[in-house]
Amino acid sequence: MKMSARNVLEGTVKKITWGDVNSEVVLELPGGQEMVSVITTNSVKRLGLEEGKKAKAFVKASSVMMIVDD
């Protein structure tokens, strides 16, 4: 597989919050940090994502937002 995204985070699916159209997937990373993604419910099913399953998150720089707390 070829991909332009260079940031790959591997972890375990911790939780899936199912929705009619979109679902939230929480990926627990080594060290306990979490990555949260909202993807279509169809994609969750197609990928076979389920709690406890290993998965990877690919992060493309143009899709990351930075914030600070005031």
Image (cartoon, grey):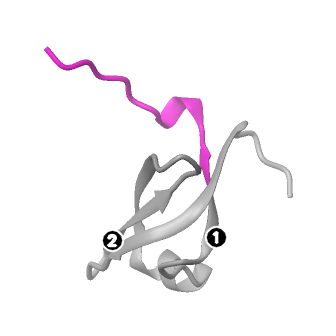
Q: Is residue 63 left or right of residue 22?
A: right
Q: Name the residue under label 2.
A: 22
Q: Is residue 38 left or right of residue 64?
A: left
How far across and how far down the image is residue 32, in percent?
47, 50
> Is residue 31 magenta-colored?
no
Disc 1 marks which amino acid? Answer: Lys
Give neighbour class at mark 2: few <14, some 14-19, many 20+ (Cα, 10 Å): some
- At mark 2, the secondary structure is strand
For image coordinates 58% across by 84% down, the residue present is: 48
For image coordinates 60% across by 59% down, the residue present is: 11
6 and 13: which is toward the camera = 13
Question: Which of the 4 image quarters holds residue 47?
Answer: bottom right
Q: Mark 1 points at which residue?
A: 54
Tell me how far mark 1 sits from mark 2, CA to CA: 20 Å
How far across and how far down the image is residue 53, in percent?
59, 77
17 and 2: which is toward the camera = 17
Disc 2 marks which amino acid? Answer: Asn
- At mark 1, the secondary structure is strand
Tell me if residue 56 comes above or below residue 58 in the rendering: below
